[in-house]
Image (spheres, grey):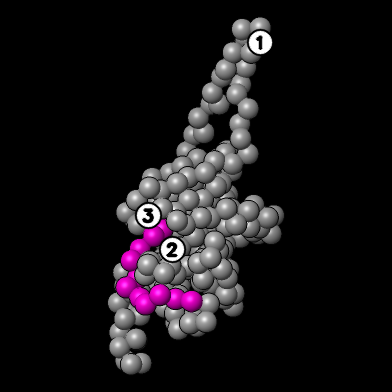
Amino acid sequence: MVGALAALLALAAVLALVVGGVVGRSIVPAPESTPDAAGESAPAQRPATVRFKDTLTDVSIAYPSTWVRQMGEDQAVRILASSPDGSAAVSVSVRKAGLEPVTPQTLPVVRPLTEDLLRADRDIEKIGEPVAVTVDGVPGYRYVYTYRRDDGRDGAHVHYFLFTQQGRLIQIVLEAVPASRLPALQPTFDRIADSFRVD
């Protein structure tokens, strides 16, 4: 039983490589204009957040409307968005994990998988203790860690590993660059994570 579980976790680890360290810069499009009562064109009121819903995986998440969506390099990445200056970002990836349904009670069984995934990323420098969480009814772990970017700067991730009843692994990665920005960004990151929904 233990050997089979270890083999399954190893296979899942290979299939679910950690995604999240890449944040690009994009140009934020100008706000749309609408005519006012006098017929003059005035900027439309921008909502505080934008909700992205992925019809393929039925996950959705809201992020600040000033952030810009990027193209992910991995097909499993359903959304990648970053602030205009690249100092903050969110990505959501969804993969088949091939695991039995995970409950809050059985969550410790998958902790080795989450830790193996993080250890596979050699850029990660310091990993904090995981916190067991439930996001929109989906159990998992939240990690906070720092890492070294390709450009030599440091960054920080708040990384959620969530396990659905359908055997999927959902990763929400919230990024702060440099790492010292994390305390200021944490309230925004908390709101983004709290907005996550899965149907």
Is label 2 or label 3 in front? 3
The magenta stretch is 93-103
Q: Amino acid at mark 2?
A: Ile
Q: Residue at x 53, y 26 (%)?
A: 30
Disc 2 packing (10 Å; few <14; some 14–19; many ≥20): many
Q: Main secondary structure of the magenta part?
A: loop
Q: CA distance from mark 1 to mark 2?
A: 46 Å
Pointer 2 and pointer 3: residues touching (CB < 8 Å)? no
Q: CA distance from mark 2 to mark 3?
A: 10 Å
Is label 1 or label 2 in front? 1
Q: Amino acid at mark 3?
A: Thr
Residue highlighted by disc 2 = 170
Q: Secondary structure at mark 3?
A: loop
User: Is residue 116 visible to us here?
Assistant: no
Q: Residue at x 54, y 23 (%)?
A: 32
Residue highlighted by disc 1 = 37
Disc 3 packing (10 Å; few <14; some 14–19; many ≥20): some
Q: Answer left or right for 5 relative to 106.
A: left
